[in-house]
Image (cartoon, rainbow, N blue to C red):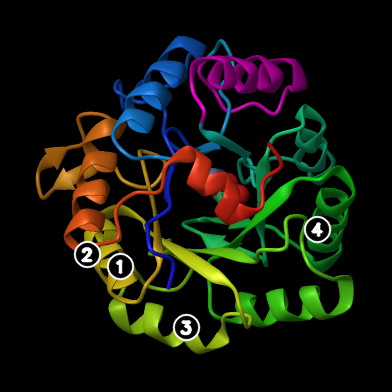
Amino acid sequence: MTPGTLITLAPTGAESAKADVPALPVTVDEVVATARDCQAIGAAVIHLHVRGEDTRPTLDLGRCREVVQAVREATDLVVQISSGGAVTDPFDQRLAVLDVEPDAASLTLGTVNFGRDVFSNPWDLIVELHTQMQQRGIVPEYEVFDLGQLATLQRLLDKHGAPHGGRVHVDLVMGVPGGMPGTTQALAACLPLLPQGSTFAATGVGRTSLPVMLAALSAGGHLRVGMEDTLTYAPGEPVRDNAQLVARAAGLARIAQRPPLTTAEARAFLGIDN
Ligand code: KMH
Ligand code: ZN
């Protein structure tokens, strides 16, 4: 088991509208401020979805570069760009975000219903993302929304080799309507299917955030938290900001006697080039 807990901050996502969630960080300054705050209390990685001036999700490369550079100047966080984007984003643009040369990028292992939408991730896109990340020296985080996607991950590694950095790190994204439920039982069912030698984090969407976090810690896993996934801190209580969610995750990690990894420890853990 890893001695510490890797905490990934997912501050914004592509699904919530600023008009509905005023506390959602969408401007460059807001993203930088939340990144800085969250690093100070235990986050080591930032999972970035970029918003345009109009507050809507964008994969515009100029804007992505601007946000990545601003976060790098203000923090030491590992910068993981989302290659998932929004459900409406075309595959070529989702591949092109690798051009901004992030430390890491997310890579989803299969198509999944996503509420009333479909988050489309066919095999050829998975292979292309994996191969391009190998060639460009970008560390993938394998996003798994359902159990069968772990079998796809094993097939990917068998056919196309290990990721850059050598570590196979999986994020179990649980509780999406259409994916696996955010329960201890579902998390436990994933464990035997994780590739040999891999590590995992878990993310519980919505009200599954806390139970998934507790289950992940008890199983030796790592954590992803943030307003991409969770907008309610407790029943009837909206999340104040991302730092509130990171503080809770860091506190639970300390109670589990696996305190948050520093950014330097996270880089070593994930095999990120310095
Ligand atoms: N926005 C979701 C459709 C990722 O970032 O890689 C996909 C997502 C996964 O958030
Ligand atoms: Zn995401």
Residue position marked by numbered label 1 in the rendering: 217
Residue 63 lies in the magenta stretch:
yes
Which element is circle 3 on? helix
For the C terminus, which image quadrant? top right
**In the displayed structure, would residue 159 be above or below residue 263?**
below
Numbered mark located on residue 191 in the image: 3
Give the residue furthest to the left. 236
Please tell me whether mark 3 or mark 2 is closer to you in this view.
2
CB contact under 8 Å: marks 1 and 3: no
Q: Earlier in the sequence, mark 2 or mark 4?
A: 4
Which element is circle 2 on? loop
Residue position marked by numbered label 4 in the rendering: 130
Amino acid under disc 2: Ala
Residue 61 lies in the magenta stretch:
yes
Q: Is residue 184 visible?
A: yes
Q: Residues within 10 Å of mark 3 (few under 14, many from 20)?
A: some
